[in-house]
Every structure is written in structure tokens, then in C-alpha cells.
Amino acid sequence: MIASVKQQKEPIAESDVCSLFPDFPASALKKPRRYKRILQPIWTEDKAKFIQVYLRYFVQITKHGAYIDGFAGPQNFDQPNSWAAALVLQSEPKWLRHFFLCELRKKSVKALEALVQEQPRTDTKGRKLQRKIEICPGDFNTSIDEILKSQSITQKEATFCLLDQWTFECHWDTLKKLAGYKQAPNNKIELLYFLGVGWMHRAFSGIRKNTEKAEKWWGRPDWRDLKTMPCQDIADLVRKRFERELEYRYVAAYPIFDKKKGNRVMYYMIHASDHDEAPALMVRAHNTAVRSLPKEVQQPLEFDHD
């Protein structure tokens, strides 16, 4: 994995630190932790399970939370076990309270509507579930304005946002809105952003005159510079932008492999959080969700502290 921790230049008082996970004590004064190298790959068919496991740990600590899925429909209708939104809704304990499932495609919206109808009204002990699940049809880059404007997500509510996009769907301005929603001393909305490097260069080659989509995705006119960069370098650049421009304290890039294509890296999952415990939870989720690494698979990089 590619990862980095932004060091604090000035001391921060513990009273100024608000925990994303309220049961943990504020720890901004501690030295940044080091995490062991992850020695197993995340396969494309395992990535939804990886997210589900991480959120399970997430809610066991927070006991509440909000979940935003920017591209919530199934990417493979014939593989229900790879549908992240379905796995997250099924996950126990059911302590996430607010769900915002966003989707542009009509077929996927119908699938989400059916998924919501299937959800139980009570937990395993027969108690009524205190959950609100909203389906938001349309372009997520527009829908996010209504979600944040409604203030349905409070400033202190632990919030997680999954962005499993098709190449250029998620605008950089949308990331800025998500990162800027929570006001200090509250921690930012936590992000899991999938960067589709496996077909990115091919997508770049298909852009001729209409460059608006790529420019909105990258947020700057220099997106053409990415055409000649190796996939790992692109992922590292995106990671650094999350750290420096979106101002997340912990940012890591996890490679997602495809067994059917010679263990080729198809995605990098960029994980961005402000809380000291989030990287440890992610490493723990990874170890739970995936299998052992074959010798021929590329080794992910260790955490790199600037």
C-alpha cells in the first residue's frame, strides 16, 4: 500500500481534538503509529467484503453513524456478493442510523429500491431498528449538495463515504465538499475512494475534444500529465492531494488486484481519515477480509511517514 501521515507542525491541545470514534481518548499529542506491511492482496471480488468488515469495526466503536454511497448500485448484477451497499445494510450490528444511497442509472435505482424493501424492520432481538435509508436518484455530484444542505448528518455524527466510481464520475469539487462539511474541531467525513487505474490510460486515450469530464474529475487543467505516468505514481499523487489539498491527516492507497488478469492492479482504494485509530482498523479489516498472498503477486508498499 502507499500511505502517508501528515505531521502536525504546531502542538495541538487535547481539548481541541474531537474524536471520530468518541469512545477513544483524543491522541493528537501522540507520535504517529507505524503499521505492519499488509502481505495479502485485495482481489476485485473481495473489495465489497473488505468495506463491510471495516464498517463493522467502525460501528462497534462509534455505536452509531451515517453512510453515504455515491455510486450505490450493483456494478455486477450477476454477482450479488460483490455489491457493497447490500453487504453494508446486511452487516451486524445494525448501528449505522442514516444511509444515503446515490445512483444515476435507472436500472440500478430500481435495484436499490428492491434492496431497501427487503431490509428488516427489527433487529435479531425483535427491537425496532432506528434507521433511515434514503435513495437519491441522479448525479451524485449534484445529490451531495442536497444531502449536506439538509444537515441530516450532524457535525458530531461519525460519517463514512464510499466512492466506488466508474473512472471519471466523481468530481474533485465533490471531494472538497465532503472534506469541508465538518467544521473544526470535528473530524472530517471519512472517505473510501476507488481510483480505477486498470483502465485509466485507455480512458484518457478516448478523450478527444470534450475534456470537461476529465477536468471536473481531476479538478485542475493538468490532468493530461497523468497520461504518461505509471499507475502507482498516479495513485501516490492522488494520495498526496487528499493529504495536502483536502487536509486529511491519514491517507493510504491500497492496491486492488484482478486474479483473472495476471494479478494486475485494477484499482487503488484511497482511504482518508483524521482519526489515529482508523488506519489500525483498516489493517485489521484487511487481515480479516482477504486471503494469503501468492508469491507472484506484487508486494504493496509500506506506510511512508513524511
Image: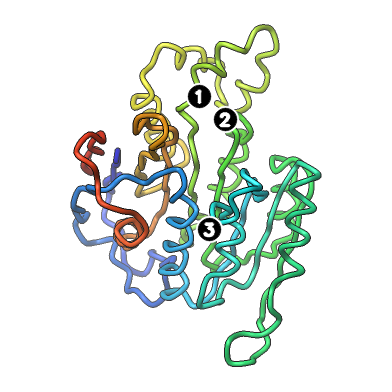
Q: Tell me the residue at 38%/64% (across/down).
A: 17
- How many residues crowd around disc 1 within 10 Å: few (fewer than 14), some, or many (20 or more)? some
Q: Looking at the image, is mark 3 or mark 2 earlier in the sequence?
A: 3
Residue 70 coordinates in the image, percent (x, y): 64, 47
As drawn, the label of residue 199 is 1
Q: Tell me the residue at 41%/29% (across/down).
A: 261
Disc 3 target residue: 160
Q: Tell me the residue at 38%/24% (across/down).
A: 231
Disc 1 to disc 3, how far (Cα)?
26 Å
Give the side of residue 156 with respect to residue 283, left or right: right
Q: Nearer the viewer, residue 190 or 104?
A: 104
Q: Nearer the viewer, residue 79 or 36?
A: 79
Disc 2 target residue: 167
Residue 192 coordinates in the image, percent (x, y): 48, 48
Quadrant where the image shows the N terminus = top left
Q: Nearer the viewer, residue 29 or 78?
A: 78
Kind of residue at disc 1: Trp
For label 1, the SS is loop
| 54 shown above or below 45 | below
